[in-house]
Amino acid sequence: MKTLAKITMIVLMSTGSWLLPQKATAQFPGITFQVFYDQLSPYGAWVNDPNYGYVWIPDESAGFYPYGTNGHWVLTEYGWTWVSDYPWGWAPFHYGRWNYDPYYGWIWVPGNEWGPAWVTWRRCNDYYGWAPLGFGITIQMSFTTNFYLPDDRWMFVRDRDFDRADLDKYYVGRRENHDLIRNARAIKNTRIDNGRKVTYVTGPDAREVRTITGRNIKPLPVNENSQPGRTIIGKDQVQIYRPPVSREDVRGQKPAPGAIATRENIKPVSERTKGDLTRTNSNTNLRKGKEQTPPVKNSVPPKYERTDKINQNNNNGVNQGGTRSSGQTKEAGTANGQKSQLPPQRVNPPSENRNLGQSNQKRNEQPPVETRNRELSNQKQMGAPTQKTQPVQPSSKTTQSKGKVTETKKSTGSAPAKTNKNETPVRRGN
């Protein structure tokens, strides 16, 4: 029994390392590319690139450089880790790759492998240098002598300033990059992450940096955050959001950005400043993913357009006598551009035409002087009884104003009798 108990104890001790809680990478649920699309949209724009698929353009000025702007290096258990001060830095500096486009500037291609920093390292005399690994470039490829990146892709700093928190104040001028790169050698320190099955470069040797800087730099353990956000540096740890990432969900559905910009929506990098990535005349609100309604041509509603045409035609159809020509129909454009017949509508003529019509009506109520005298003469010849009246003599004073005739009558006794010009004279017997 004692032998059996000893054997059991030995087995438990040998297997205890598996039973103890491990620093598993899957203690938080994994994510898909959809989290990248949603979380980074407020800080830039997604475009569909023919070579890489959906890529992200940060809303930064032309002076932005990945692994160079707004961040610094911190030694962790995974090697030299880039800690970004951007709220979105947890994703583009630890997953995927950065490429440079002449029009867009720096673009980020999403990836599903986490690393402390996806860069290639160089050492030249008293300087350390690094540059982003482009899409499709492996670590082993960057170690070869044939590997080439343009001079302006590199960041160099004196080795004694390498671990400073305000690293951007100590960068070497870009004009010196050519000579530094020509004399530099690759730093090939790597680390294999068996849990994630990933190999990455750890950067300069920590013991060498301690000796050069004279500072006691110890690697900090990495604890995982449960949600996206800035990397938090404490006295004894670094908290990073680094969940496992898959390109598709369990149902096989492919994620996609909520809003996709086009080349016309994005300003070229040469004209860009922070906060104005998209053009102001864009019809798409890229930040919220909502389309704005484009301006409508001929915004006047059709009914108002028809009314205007009718009023115009009616005014043209009023004759000088104040009456409207009958039997006319007006044409107006409908909403679909076809012509339709509209019934004539009654409209009031302008004030001048109304006055003109009233003047003509007054003239029609009393016939001219010559006509009345002629009627009186005919009545006398036919023997019709007449009243004693005096012929009305035309006045010597007549005025005309805008087609109106004003008569000045001489009153010589009783007023002349009114006769109807349409009334037929009554013949009396002989």
Image (cartoon, rainbow, N blue to C red):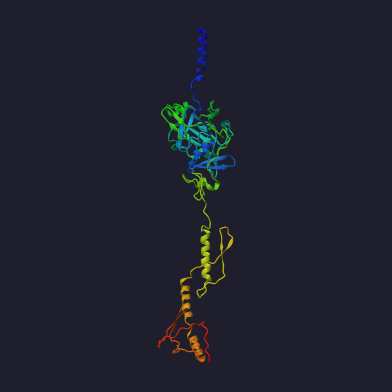
Give the image quarter of residue 70.
Answer: top left
* Residue nearest the viewer, comparing 75 with 216: 75
Residue appearing at x 50%, y 10% in the figure: 5
Q: Position of residue 399 (x, y in %)?
A: 44, 82
Image coordinates of residue 340 in percent, x first then y, are 58, 62
Using the image, determine if residue 209 lies above or below residue 272: above
Q: Residue at x 53, y 62 (%)?
A: 306
The image quarter containing residue 49 is top right
- Residue 417 visible, this angle: yes
- Tally of marks: 0
Q: Position of residue 181 (x, y in %)?
A: 53, 35
**Residue placed most toward the observer, 262 or 391:** 391
Relative to 307, say whether 16 is above or below: above
Q: In the image, what residue occupies the spot 46% across and 76% down?
A: 358
On the question of residue 126 being in view, the answer is no
Residue 267 image offset from top left, x and y in percent: 51, 47
Q: Nearer the viewer, residue 364 or 324?
A: 364
